[in-house]
Image (cartoon, grey):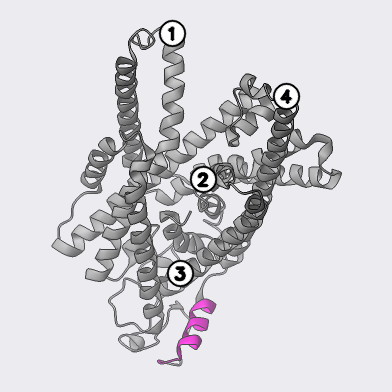
Amino acid sequence: MVGPAILYLPHGFASAGYLVAVPLLLLSTVLFLWSSGCLLQAWRMENSRLRRERKNNESLSLKIQRIRLSYPELAYRSFGTTGETLVQLGISLMQSGVCLTYLIFVPQNLHSSALDLFGTNISTSWCLAFMMAVQIPMSWIRDIRRLTVTNLLANVLILYGLLTCLGFALKQMGGMEEDVDVGEEGVDGVGYDYSDSAEGSVGAGPKIAGVDDDDDERPFLQEVLYRFRSLPPFNPTGWFLFMGTSVLLFEGSITLLIPLQEAVQRTSDRRKFPSLYKKVILAIVAFYSFFGITCWMAFGNTVRTVMTTSLPTGQLATSVQLAYSLAVVFTFPLQNFPSLEIVCRAVEKWLAKKGLDGGVHYGGNCAKSKIMSQQRNIISTLLVICLSVIAATCMNDLDKVVSLMGSLLGCPLAFVVPPLIHNRLGKSRIGKWRRVGNWIVAGLGVAAMAVSSVATVMKWD
């Protein structure tokens, strides 16, 4: 869950102001935990029902084909084939949206790294072409277990990047020794300004233009408080972008909830899972908040959407950019895998229905496997190319892409559908107020999706 999306937070806070960003992040967390609880309770009810049926009729397990529970499966049991199709489509688009942000994130980091290391202004288009050339063959991997090592390495690189970014931020708040771009306009024209007398001094601190600074040096905690008081509490021109950003931070975690619960074997551990899951989510969100506000205070409103490109120039900063880029390159196939599987199954069904499956059903197992593998490779290649084309057109609008993905796709999957599934499967087994609460959460999800999506599209240049 702690992926590159956390690097969008400092810019997101700056776009909204802390009086909007912090409450929105808390509200998103509360709604997410409520919805995840709905999904887990729906899974528990269906799982218990299936166990009772198998116990009453031992031969029933041979007749039921749809036994393995998942998010789409619960949607199928609640709303039929239409519900399952809509959830699968939402998951596919959401995962593709996350991959789209990766295709923007990496070229921007590589562009900045090449500029710092070699003084060469390599176009982001060339960096995107390199990213596409790497991801196309990696998307051909069919066994997800082969991605275990690269995913582990990506986690190590992300941890290194986050800790180093925090180190830069804390050092920045402790002094202005680094040459940081701070005098330019930041988010929607709001920027920090530094007094001439403060240049090169320790504890100079940012200030809004027109605010005097009497002390050139301050203790660290006083400097932190000064910087926080200097932050704009509200940005009327960009606050709505944070609505979608706060949802995308969870990066599709709701789709992994049921598989994680299914993976727990012991009954006693299964009972503990919901409580443990909530604690993990709360801990991650607390770290998100600390990271976002700290980096915002350190780099001011000039912080860019990809925060690593706002770090002071130097080899350490470049190593962070390269480490995060490599981590995203390794993570991309794993993020793209669910979307690719859904698309491949849909295409195979369509080809079989139209009689255009290339004789898959008439050859031997080897021939069938080879044809299906070729079809999958073609689909995966076209998917990466399509995402790359979209990324090229949205290269300078990552903040809006993040907001639109979170609001248009994240809100329905995370806030709307799970409460509705719970109400449908629970029926008389859940109380009246719980049903009302589910409708309220679903309604808030629809409202957030509509407001944030429309506002983001209207803001798009």
Give the mark, 1 or 2, whose residue is nearer the N terminus. 2
Q: Closer to the camera: disc 3 or disc 4?
A: 4
x then y, percent, for residue 319:
25, 64
Q: For residue 377, which numbered disc appears in the image?
A: none
x then y, percent, for residue 232:
53, 70
x then y, percent, for residue 339:
44, 34
Task: Estimate how packed mark 2 is, as few (under 14), some (14 to 19) or many (20 or more) residues with alpha carbons within 10 Å.
Answer: many
Question: How far separated are the C-alphas under marks 3 and 4?
Answer: 61 Å
In the image, residue 207 lies in the stretch drawn in magenta:
no
Residues marked 1 and 2 touching at CB (< 8 Å): no
**What residue sits right under mark 4 in the picture?**
57
x then y, percent, for residue 185:
39, 65
In the image, residue 228 lies in the stretch drawn in magenta:
yes
Q: For residue 252, which numbered disc appears in the image?
A: 2
Task: Estimate how packed mark 3 is, as few (under 14), some (14 to 19) or many (20 or more) residues with alpha carbons within 10 Å.
Answer: many
Q: Is residue 292 left or right of residue 78?
A: left
SS under mark 4? loop
Give the mark, 4 or 2, whose residue is nearer the N terminus. 4
